[in-house]
Image: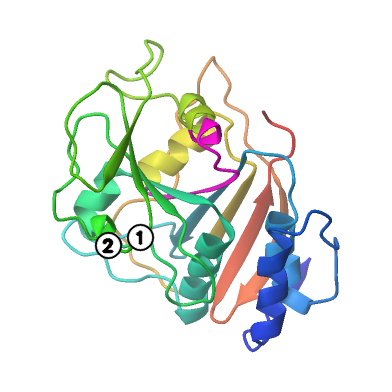
Amino acid sequence: MTIAYDAEGGDERWQSVLRACHDPEPAIGQPVCGLWDIYGPIAACRHYPYVIAQLGQSLDGRIVTAPDQSPAISGPEGLRHLHRLRALVDAVIVGVGTVVADDPRLTVRLAQGPSPARIVIDPRFRLPERAKLLADDGVPVFVVQSCTGERARRVQPVVVPATADHAPGSIAPAAIIASLAQLGFRRILVEGGAHTVSAFLAAGMIDRLHVTVAPVIIGRGLTGCNLTPTNGQHGMIRPQTTIHRLGSDILFDCVFGDIR
């Protein structure tokens, strides 16, 4: 089913979605047009931790162009969609590779709502000291690491031991989510990059995946998902999917159900 996104939905409609995040009995399916159709299931969810992942890509599946370039692939509404997702969650996760390559702020700027806590997965202590996400803006910054070690003043370390059944030095996504849940984070957005989103998807730790596709063809660069079959399983993943239009972009809203 395709649902047109109401880009001019109005502040009150978006505020009603934000309020549902904290309403103990949210009104499921309340008539607030495309905004509720897209964001209501996230705001109204009450089984925690609830993990959403997001990818913005081109028609040919690229999320960036050349290694030394990272222009915005998504259109204006696709970018605002990402900021609305940030406003709905308690924490946003990125891998340290994304921080090194793109230096994101991970704040909410293109929508109304609070900025979430910022989480960086950095088992090898690669986080730059002057990364933009370390800005002293009152939003907490956590770094997931596999051993103790000194960090910048702004950083709150979360030590999650690496596991033997993963790549050397890597940390299992399930262990990361469990540790963040113990810190009180209920809704968690896995924003990037491709390796991190793919790892969480392969581990079955994603409840909902939002993929926005922009009408551009790049021809080279990183792809959004790169899943390595495990335990001899080569079958396709076929989630329940709804399609929405975000201005010039198309959103695939994928639900994975009770996979954890």
- Closer to us: 31 or 116: 116
As shown in the figure, which amino acid type bears the numbered disc 2? Thr
Q: Looking at this view, name the residue that lies furthest to the top.
A: 164
Compared with 151, 189 (above or below) is below
- The percent coordinates of residue 9 (x first, y second) are 68, 85
Residue bearing mark 2 = 65
Compared with 258, 28 (above or below) is below
Residue bearing mark 1 = 138
Residue at 34% x, 18% y: name it: 162
Residue at 38% x, 14% y: name it: 163
Question: Marks 2 and 1: in contact by CB < 8 Å?
Answer: no
Q: Is residue 208 left or right of residue 195?
A: right
- The percent coordinates of residue 166 (x first, y second) are 38, 18
- The percent coordinates of residue 68 (x first, y second) are 16, 60
- Closer to us: 155 or 13: 155
For the rendered model, the colour scheme is: rainbow
Q: Is residue 59 magenta?
A: no
Badge 1 density bin: few <14, some 14–19, many ≥20, Cα 10 Å: few
Q: Magenta residues, as a range? A: 180-193
Secondary structure under the numbered disc 1 in the rendered image: loop
- Placement of the C terminus among the 4 image quadrants: top right
